[in-house]
Amino acid sequence: MDEIDGRAVSVTVNGIARTATVPARLTLLDCLREEWSLTGTHAGCEHGVCGACTVLLDGEPVRACLLLAVQCEGASVTTIEGLAGDGDLHPVQRAFQECHGLQCGFCTPGMVLTAAYLLGRTPDPGEDEIREALAGNLCMCTGYQNIVRAVRRAAEGREAGA
Amino acid sequence: MSTGAAAPGWVGRALPRVEDPRFLRGRATYLDDLRVPGTLHVALLRSPHAHARLVALDAREARAVPGIAALLTGNELAATMPPLRPLIPIPDPPRTWPLAVHKTSVITRTIASTLSSCVLKSTHTPISATV
């Protein structure tokens, strides 16, 4: 097996060291889903438009469909499975549930990770900032109003029904 | 969504969805998450132009790729079926098929499709199309 068909890659995914021997052309998206069975990261458009495959690479949101797995050698990746782990829902996840910020849930992992990143940098974003930050994440259920509300609620840390 | 306080009964009250946690944690199961042995994957070649003549299509190299179960071009499909019937009866309806035959008429018009035992192979199948 040559370097093109099989290259060793080591990535820390959700705090766990993962390794795989993958074709150089394999995307991080396919590596997460196929090699490591982390199917929470979704394949939508597969060309960087829809944001369904968004993961955090060393803390920054990236399109897993536009990155090769081998480019992530030594990096730390957070997927939706790792945001809260087995514990309580992350405040953003909880706010999405409270505000009905999801229907089919396909765009949700990318939305939630992008929103979590936004709130990490901008704890109190205005609606325009939220919409700008989420502009690269498409929702085909057209749930944007509730998604924006969910991010605001996560920022405010409000309880359900408040 | 916030009428619960005003409505003491169940009508109009927002309820938390029981299915949300699995969606929010990335643990839901979608069709693409299933691994069924023997599944074939289809790849579609689309036109880069909204309205263009299909000048040439060379799928010989693609057919020779190991793992390709089937490859279908518009001409081959048209030889097996009549044109699609228009949704409403119109005089002299356009003769169109599910795959583009002589020209592409909408931007997402599909030129050819392959069925493959491996999605990686099908998405890297070499088909040359001139439109």
Image (cartoon, rainbow, N blue to C red):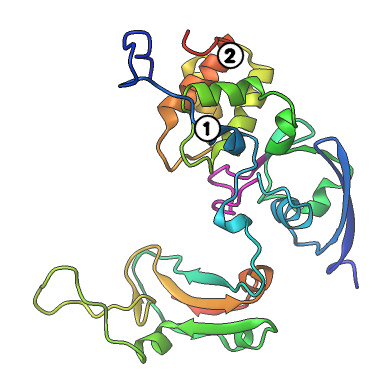
Name which residue lies at 42% across and 89% down: B76
As helix, strand or loop, the secondary structure at mark 1 comes to loop
Looking at the rendered structure, which numbered label has been put on residue B118?
A: none
Q: Residue furthest left?
A: B91
Residues rendered magenta in the picture: A41-54
Q: Left of B83 or right of it: where is A146?
A: right
Is B25 situated above or below B107? above
As helix, strand or loop, the secondary structure at mark 2 comes to helix
Let me know if residue A47 is in the magenta part: yes
Percent of width and height locating residue A162: 48, 7
Chain bearing mark 1: B
Identify the residue under disc 2: A155
* Count of numbered tags: 2
Q: Callout 1, which amino acid?
A: Val
Name which residue lies at 63% across and 86% down: B61
Q: Nearer the viewer, residue A120 or B81?
A: B81
Q: Residue furthest front?
A: B9
Is A160 situated above or below A32? above
Identify the residue under disc 1: B18
Is B1 situated above or below A16? above
Helix, strand or loop: magenta stretch: loop
Is A35 situated above or below B97? above
Residues at marks 2 and 1, CA–CA distance in whole angstroms: 24 Å
Local crowd size for mark 2, using a 10 Å CA cut-off: few (<14), some (14–19), many (≥20): many
Name which residue lies at 74% across and 34% down: A82
Q: Residue furthest bottom?
A: B79
